Image (tube, rainbow, N blue to C red):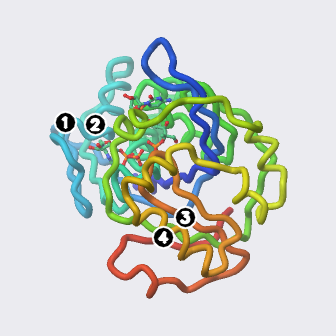
Amino acid sequence: MVVFPNAKINIGLNIIGKRPDGFHNISSCFYPIGWTDALEVVPAEELVCHVAGIDVPGAEGDNLCLKAYRLLAKDYPLPTVALHLLKALPIGAGLGGGSADATFTLMALNQQFDLKLSEAQLADYARQLGSDCAFFVKNEPVYCYQKGDQFEPIALSLAGKWIVVVNPGIHISTAEAYAGIIAKEPAQDLRQSLIAPIEEWRYNVVNDFEGPLSAKYPAIGQIKNRLYESGALYASMTGSGSTVYGIFDQETDLMNSFVGLKQWHGVLK
Ligand SMILES: C[C@@](CO)(OP(=O)(O)O)[C@H](O)COP(=O)(O)OP(=O)(O)OC[C@H]1O[C@@H](n2ccc(N)nc2=O)[C@H](O)[C@@H]1O
Ligand SMILES: Nc1ncnc2c1ncn2[C@@H]1O[C@H](COP(=O)(O)OP(=O)(O)O)[C@@H](O)[C@H]1O
């Protein structure tokens, strides 16, 4: 079967405190977008993961799709499969692409081999693969907290708005991004900030990674400024960077503004 693991954006991201396990407690809003990889799962004589498109750093065996397969195979008698991944989502980009690949592998195996795992069971497996992996089970806008692996529904719809997503080509590892942060309580609860009209978000919906990372990588701030100059209602870096997005009221053609950079645009659901 073929599935299309999609990216997410973070709308606001507060890094609240360091946890005893070395991770950080955060709060954020995860919102799915339509930029995707493609992943085919087919029965095969041996377990393999073939990647086409963007090169995934690291050994083939470290691919999160294979890690997801192995995790389920510990508990269920799965046949061996070939995983064909067409990698389109920029890597180390704050788009959660690797996490989406991992969770879509779990969901594809569940469906293809009729494992009858519930959404809650899939989310428990996904959490073991990465902090934001469980989001992709329901794949709906949520407010997230703790490690970014606990979710509550959020009454936020951007359906019909246009989004432009631009990746400056800078790979930032999530661990590197967290290492440069001094955690603090946010001035206002993100859920409150998001109740305001989107035009006001620029004043108080903040990604705590953005300041330190745009000081280090000026391209991040330059893209954000360009998006605002082009009429974005709200623009921000997503996740641990380096991708930047802008949300617009209507379709906007910015392809010529970001020549040579990986980018995607489309309508939000
Ligand atoms: C920053 C966020 C926010 O959306 O997304 P991305 O930018 O990666 O998409 C997430 O917290 C990323 O989640 P994920 O990419 O799954 O991270 P993990 O693999 O679990 O962790 C990678 C490393 O990041 C740090 N880490 C991660 C999550 C967290 N709440 N606190 C942390 O300190 C730890 O150093 C950890 O070893
Ligand atoms: N299928 C995959 N796609 C992307 N990255 C993967 C994958 N499997 C393992 N990784 C590793 O995960 C890390 C980044 O994951 P990714 O989800 O792209 O970052 P981010 O969460 O910042 O968007 C990279 O270091 C990469 O080597």
Quick one: which residue is furthest to the top in this view? Answer: 20
Q: CA distance from mark 2 to mark 4?
A: 35 Å
Between discs 3 and 1, the one toward the N terminus: 1
Residue named by callout 2: 66
Residue named by callout 3: 245
Amino acid at the residue labelled 4: Ile
Amino acid at the residue labelled 1: Gly
Q: Are marks 4 and 1 in contact (CB under 8 Å)?
A: no
Tell me: residue 158, above or below residue 48.
below
Q: How dense is the environment of label 3, judged by Cα within 10 Å: few (below 14), some, or many (20 and up)?
A: many
Between discs 2 and 4, the one toward the N terminus: 2
Residue named by callout 4: 223
Query: Quick check: can you spot residue 3?
Result: no
Between discs 3 and 4, the one toward the N terminus: 4
Q: Are marks 1 and 2 in contact (CB under 8 Å)?
A: yes
Between discs 4 and 1, the one toward the N terminus: 1
Q: How dense is the environment of label 1, judged by Cα within 10 Å: few (below 14), some, or many (20 and up)?
A: few
Q: How dense is the environment of label 2, judged by Cα within 10 Å: few (below 14), some, or many (20 and up)?
A: many
The quarter of the picture where residue 34 lies is bottom right
Circle nearer the viewer, 3 or 4: 4
- Mark 1 residue CB less than 8 A from any atom of ligand 2: no
SS under mark 4 = helix
Residue named by callout 1: 61
